[in-house]
Amino acid sequence: MSIVKDEMASAAKNIDFDEKSREISALQAISPIDGRYSALTRPICDYFSEYALIYHRLEVEIEYFLALLAEIGISLNDNEIDFVRGIKRQGNLQIALKVKQQEASTAHDVKALEYVLKEHVAGSSLAVHVEKIHLGLTSEDINNLAYSLMQQRALRSVIWPALHQLLLGLSGLVKAERATPMLARTHGQPATPTTLGKELGVFLYRLTSECHELLQQRFRGKLSGATGTYAALQVSYPTHDWCNFAKKFVEQLGLTHNPITTQIEPHDGFAALCDCLRHLSNILLNFCQDIWWYISLGYFRQVARSGEVGSSTMPHKVNPIDFENAEGNLGIASALLTHFSDKLTRSRLQRDLSDSTVLRNVGVAFAHLLVAIRGLERGLRKLEVDRKALESDLSAHPEVLAEAYQTVLRASGSQAPYERLLALTRGRQVSLAELRSWVRSLDLTVDKETLLLELTPDRYVGLAAEMADVALAAANSLLVRHGGTQ
């Protein structure tokens, strides 16, 4: 994947995009993906821009041309092979511009690419073979493979490395706060204490599990002609095993072969990827919301950066904008991913074109997801834990010990302790002194009375720290196994 990226980056230097031009372009963009967030989303352009689509189509066309010649017994020497492959390495931005110019005449983007590629080959020693370019294929054979490569490479080279960094940052916070007591809130109300590390560890574990699923996704491809029957190839070269040829070719590209399709690859694999990314987005969105609440409760302070302002009128504000912006971008990504999964798995009869414009927007979802991940990573770096706030909140709610009291008493055989504590604590503030006085009024053994009297909210956290360790171990295993890129 890095070779592809290096090739594209090298070719991009052939066109002069100075910084002022970029700034003007960003100011005129309709979408913030190409405007306000363009610096963050630039890596996605390598995989989902119009240029990137042409590049990946060109790659598939070239590799197919070489594979077809080999299959039908036409041998090329190393120089000839290098020449053909070099077409996508040398000046391919200029080729992309030629393709767009040709498309103005053909009104068909893949046919335009075919003509431009033929033009290059026609001027070489391979001119006699020029009509073997795109032979036996329909445009969807090129498109589905190009899009699968784009999705696979964007995931592995951009999205996963960003997630990797986020998981590293979150792991560090979980480890640091694994045993830091914190008041829990169920239904928004004070509840059995936990630790900050354990609650962050819940998200770390969920994200780790979903990232594991994400990295197992298979990217599928087909190469079977206009209606999925291999008819054009079979009638032209009837003695060849075209099903096996297609399988080897698709797998040579690093994709999973789908042998039975209509004209289009049905996008079931891509739908599974979208569902996985949507689930991941929803976990991250939930994380944004919880961090927002922890900041609001004062559990976290945000580091104020020199020169920044939080409000146009309130000088004191340090707003949780990284988490709020991430939440918004995740919502957009999730909505698009839902539509892709729903729409792309349905096509009328053997083919309709309603998927075409939808597929051209796949990069938009990836870009919004990337902006959100980077924002979360940036937001995490600004957080500082306010332990005094955590301690103060815990000590202000000693009533959360009622669960511990009634459970210990029930286990000891006491009668109706839940109901007695219900009357003492529900809907009213109660001090730790009152609770201890109530405990002393009971006829308990010395060890049970001592246990309850010594219990405080900050000590009633169960196995929370150990649960944080479980999350850390799972995340570490994934991060070590897959590294920064896959």
Image: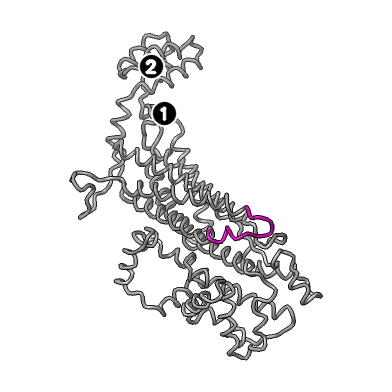
- Left or right position of 199 against 214: left
Q: Nearer the viewer, residue 116 or 88?
A: 116
Crowding at label 2, few (<14), some or many (≥20) Cα neighbours within 10 Å? few
The local secondary structure at tag 1 comes to: loop
- Left or right position of 438 against 104: left
- Left or right position of 37 against 105: left
Q: Which residues are magenta?
A: 346-357
| Residue 160 x %, y % | 49, 57
Q: Tell me, what colour scheme is on the image?
A: one colour
The local secondary structure at tag 2 comes to: loop
Q: Nearer the viewer, residue 194 or 364?
A: 364
Q: Quadrant of residue 75?
A: bottom right
Crowding at label 1, few (<14), some or many (≥20) Cα neighbours within 10 Å? few
Q: Nearer the viewer, residue 121 or 384?
A: 121
Pointer 2 residue: 426
The residue under the point 64% across, 55% down is 347
- Left or right position of 14 against 395: right
| Residue 196 x %, y % | 38, 38
